Amino acid sequence: MKKTAIILGATGLTGGILLEKLLKDPSFEKIKLFSRSSAENNSSKVEEHLINMFQLEDHSEAFKADVIFCCIGTTKANTPDKETYKKIDNGIPVTAAKLAKQNGIKTFIVISAMGADADSSIFYNKTKGEMQRDVLQQNIENTYVLQPSLIVGDRNENRFGEKVATVFMKTFGFLIPKKYKMIKAETIAEAMLVLAKEGFSKQQITSDEIKKIAQNAGNRT
């Protein structure tokens, strides 16, 4: 039976790559996009909902699918106000998880971050950790929280800090444990697709495990 997917964050780097993969995958017949701006994709498989993402709960009737891919996220540079930052990185994913539970959606896959910890004194790590905790508390049957390290890829925006970190990791990569090495957005998107189809033995998945999942998918094709 063909599936319907929901993507939150399809206009971002990883979400955009994931959208292209789903469009090519015959096992998915419909892809619902919920975002504030258009992904500008004219495929007949795409159903786009341009909404206020802070009011996602108002669209529960349309929020129905077999699997949810949550690729929502922001940066300190783009969102310096901490309250707004938390509404994006915590509020939207948690609201989506609650709607998934309410609507009987059995698979929820969300991108978090390495170092996420609800008890952390670092705002970014704490916000991601609280998001993970609150999503997992919804007890959705198949919940997968991805914890990637530095995500790299061709972005439309300029992230100076990311560029510096990328150069450092490339130069001193041989000194960095696998868990902390940078990861391509393409790899994360591939792993998310595999998780939607095949699942995994753990709910919280580290960066090196994400790479293994994606690599094994490549070996099967």
Image (spheres, grey):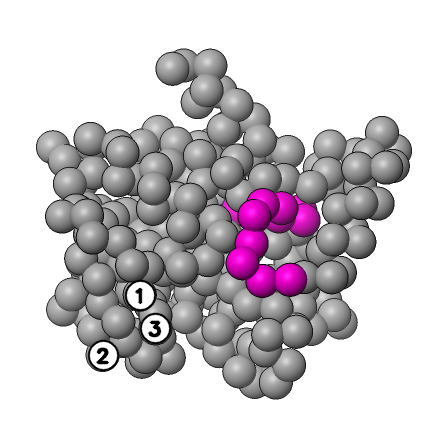
> SS class of the residue under badge 3?
loop
> SS class of the residue under badge 2?
helix
In this rendering, which labeled residue sits more in front, label 1 or label 3? 1
User: Can residue 189 be found in the magenta stretch?
Assistant: no
Alpha carbon of mark 1 to alpha carbon of mark 3: how far? 7 Å
Identify the amino acid type marked 2: Asp
Q: Which residues are magenta?
A: 146-158
Quadrant assignment, res 139? bottom left
CB contact under 8 Å: marks 2 and 3: no
Alpha carbon of mark 2 to alpha carbon of mark 1: how far? 19 Å
Chain-order first, disc 2 or disc 1:
1
Identify the amino acid type marked 3: Arg
Instruction: Identify the residue shown where x is 61% and y is 68%.
Output: 75
Q: Residue furthest top?
A: 220
CB contact under 8 Å: marks 1 and 3: no
Instruction: Identify the residue shown where x is 50% and y is 38%.
Output: 186
Residue at the spot of label 2: 58
Instruction: Identify the residue shown where x is 56% and y is 48%.
Output: 154
CB contact under 8 Å: marks 2 and 1: no
Residue at the spot of label 3: 36
Alpha carbon of mark 2 to alpha carbon of mark 3: how far? 14 Å
Q: Is residue 163 in view?
A: yes
- Asked whether, in this view, residue 51 is left or right of residue 209, the answer is left
